[in-house]
Amino acid sequence: MSRMRARKATAAREGFSGSDAPALQDLMRCVHCGLCLAHCPTYIELGLETESPRGRLHLMRAVSQGRIPVSQNVVRHLDLCLQCRNCQAVCPSGVPYGQIMEETRAEILRDGRRAPASWLASRLVLRLFFSRPERVRYLMTALGLYERSGFQGLLRRSPLLNLLPDPWRNLEQLVPRVSARPFLARGVVGSPAHGPPKFRVALLSGCMMPYIFGQVHEATVRLLARHGCEVVVPPEQVCCGALHLHSGDRQEAKRLARHNIDVFLAEKVDAIIVNVAGCGAAMKEYGQLLKDDPRYAKRASRFSALVKDVNEFLAALPLSDGLGPLHQVVTYQDPCHLAHAQGIKVQPRALLQAIPGLELVEMSHPDQCCGSGGIYNLTHPHLAQRLLRRKMLEVAATGAQVVATANAGCALQLEAGLRRYGLSGRVAHVVELLDEAYQRGSGTP
Ligand code: SF4
Ligand code: SF4
């Protein structure tokens, strides 16, 4: 066999062949028009075709057709993608970029020899901790002790921190503050104060949310109850699997999805409410994820149809009376998985603008990624920092006292940005501000 034929045969063997492989017809939908390039954060920062959606689609198609192998170079370009889906939102050909990238990562990860060490490590950590609610609890308890014992302050003030490798230093700066009062309530957690409920809804509590943003859950429950909902938190729910999906672990994401489908559908609710954009996007796609599963395909579609982001759900209702004034300048950061994956941009703004006294000042690019990208800010600290710096310059230009958003990862990244660049102000979820306005309206401090 000639050398060229041998090379081609090897490349073909290395193409995509697993059950989760991206479909060639999806890859072929890209007509190379380049309209997405100006919206891609990695292309904007690096200016390279290989770091653009069009370039990455070229690479994925070439691998899929067996024309090139999954080399380290190919993986590096795919790995640098934030999976923010900004390209997907503007693509006139409807290329399902997010799905293609998740499937491609799953294909590469399927054969451990082709996957970079960081992907294998992410899969291990996500399976070890995020997949198991009881282990998340241990992890959060340990983190809370680290923060409250004074060891964190000591480390932050000591020169030791600068000796740590970049990813570890970055991790330390992004470490979330563990709430002393986590949201661990289960079962029925909220009901309308007057009259029978109009809706029965289930709340996704999530893996980390209860420990680091328990107050967002509390605000969500109060708002839902105020708007006529009986709110239930299914006790047996598990992590939604969004981070697993982004990291290419579709197998584990499917296991978690099946479990959540059983648990949530058993509650017979009118809607499944999610207040974290990344989780909501993943859950709205359970139908697609399990479309080839004969036992779950139908139920997964039914489940996905019930999923509503909290902004989406509340903005569709007439807001109840009683909003008090909140005299603050607020700017809103669109979470990528709310704006681009779920197409929800108007609703959070409408809720903010309903608050008397609140002045909404837009950044120049509110729907550009802040660099959070799931765990991207840990795996790619340098590029994530460049994106964060760009974001903070835009925030500073608005003069806002509050940066509103609707995703836990973005909130952590933005808080780290305010600290790093010495900006005053705070980060808040849209529902926290809305709830605060109702509290003021009712005279509650
Ligand atoms: S992904 Fe869409 S917008 Fe980007 S080059 Fe292809 S067809 Fe054009
Ligand atoms: S998902 Fe985001 S980073 Fe990745 S190619 Fe699309 S726009 Fe660029």
Image: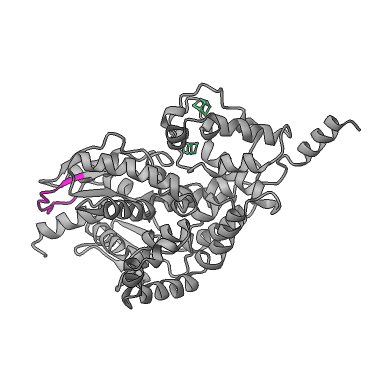
Q: Position of residue 54 (x, y in %)?
A: 54, 29
Instruction: Please tell me in which quadrant of the rendered image residue 439 appears.
Output: bottom left
Q: Position of residue 65 (x, y in %)?
A: 71, 33
Q: Is residue 134 visible?
A: yes
321 magenta-colored: yes
Q: Point out the image quarter for the C terminus.
A: bottom left
106 magenta-colored: no
For residue 402, side relative to residue 274 (left or right):
left
Q: Main secondary structure of the magenta part?
A: loop
In this picture, which residue range is highlighted in magenta? 320-330
Instruction: Please tell me in which quadrant of the rendered image residue 76 appears.
Output: top right
For residue 28, side relative to residue 194 (left or right):
right
Q: Point out the image quarter for the N terminus.
A: top right
Q: Nearer the viewer, residue 352 or 232?
A: 352
- Snapshot colouring: one colour
Q: Nearer the viewer, residue 71 or 443?
A: 71
- Residue at image coords 32%, 39%: 345
Q: Position of residue 40 (x, y in %)?
A: 44, 34
Q: Position of residue 272 (x, y in %)?
A: 40, 55
Against 363, is 311 above or below?
Answer: below
For residue 130, side relative to residue 66 (left or right):
left
Against 135, is 226 above or below?
Answer: above
Q: Is residue 333 visible?
A: no
